[in-house]
Amino acid sequence: MNHFPEAWGRPRNDVYGAYDHSYLQTLGPKAHTSSPAVTGTSVVGVKFNGGVALATDNLASYGSLARFSDVKRLRSFGDKAMVGFGGDVSDMQYLDRLLESMDIKENYSTHGNMLNAKNLHTYLAKVFYKRRSEFNPLWNHVLVAGFDGEGEPFLSSADLLGTTFSAPHLATGFGAHLAVPILRRKFPEDTPLEEVSQEDAVAALKECLKVLFYRDARSLDKYSIAVITKDGIDLKEDEQIQGQSWAFAERIKGYGAQTV
């Protein structure tokens, strides 16, 4: 072995020949996601009487830099299902194209689009598990909201390992630590779904997003929120947190681009 400090552990060139780096060269881009670069944070969802509400902020962070402030992380599938993406943005874009192609095939089939939210969740969980088994995971944690085959509100999660979980209220990322306790306090587990109104669910999501904006360094005060009912999907993508107390900083001399 070569024990010179600049090449510790390498075989000696005069004995074994020069080290061949050619096998490391590839003609295409790097395909394995082992360290996500641009990521989105929490997705929060709540079931209510007659549907499901889902919300995310619009920030995509480059490491610790709040790089992209207009990234929409809610995607609709048909008119009865919605997917909220947390994690790597490039993998989100891949899944978005995958679901869009499947949606087109479904709509052009003889039976029309027959996939409900529960079917969609099962499909995504299998995709995650397949990619994880190939050691090329999709670095995302998603919430799927909508209706199941029985017409009941459906909310479930799937992560990069293919692990799934269902509950009346869910959150990914830092929201699992900050938003879920708020939702459990507002809507205890023994609360019947019939007692949770759409207005209460939306108000709870907005409160969760406000807390995440204050406490999660990878969050933003601009957000998207979707309400899925049997009448369709009501999606708003350019909402602003109201009454947030950090706005006072803009009035401080020397803050940001202020020159006065």
Image (cartoon, rainbow, N blue to C red):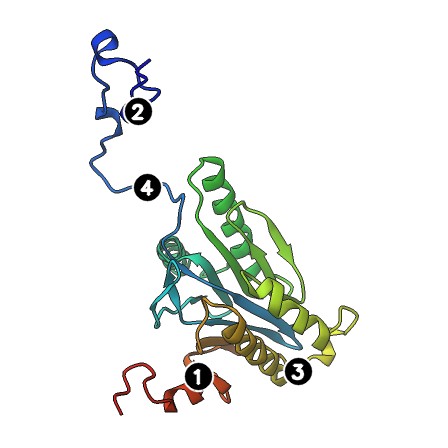
Q: Is residue 233 left or right of residue 94?
A: right
* Amino acid, disc 1: Gln
Query: Would you say 46 lies left or right of 235 here?
Result: right
Amino acid of disc 4: Ala
- Which quadrant of the rendered structure holds the C terminus? bottom left
> Which numbered mark, 2 or 4, is in the foreground of this view?
2
Gap between marks 3 and 2 measured at Cα: 68 Å
Q: Report whether 201 appears left or right of 185.
A: left
Q: Could you tell which of marks 3 and 1 lies nearer the N-terminus?
A: 3
Q: Residues within 10 Å of mark 4 (few under 14, many from 20)?
A: few
**Tag 3 secondary structure:** loop
Tag shown at residue 5: 2
Distance from disc 4 to disc 3, alpha carbons, whole Å, reads 45 Å
Which numbered disc, 2 or 1, marks the residue that appears first in the sequence? Answer: 2
Label 2 vs label 4: CA separation?
33 Å
Circle 4 or circle 3, nearest the eye: 4
In whole angstroms, how far apart are the C-alphas of marks 2 and 1? 56 Å
CA distance for labels 4 and 1:
36 Å
In-front residue for pair 118/11: 11
Please state which amino acid type lies under the numbered disc 3.
Ser
**Residue at the image point whose x is 61% and y is 61% from the top:** 149
Residue at figure coordinates x 33%, y 13% from the top left:
1
Give percent across and percent down for residue 217: 47, 68
Q: Nearer the viewer, mark 2 or mark 1?
A: 2
Towards the viewer: 55 or 219: 219
Provide the residue designation for mark 3. Answer: 197
Tell me which label, 4 or 1, sits earlier in the chain.
4
> What residue did someone put label 1 on?
240
Query: Can you identify the residue that label 4 sits on?
Result: 31
* N-terminal-most mark, 4 or 3: 4
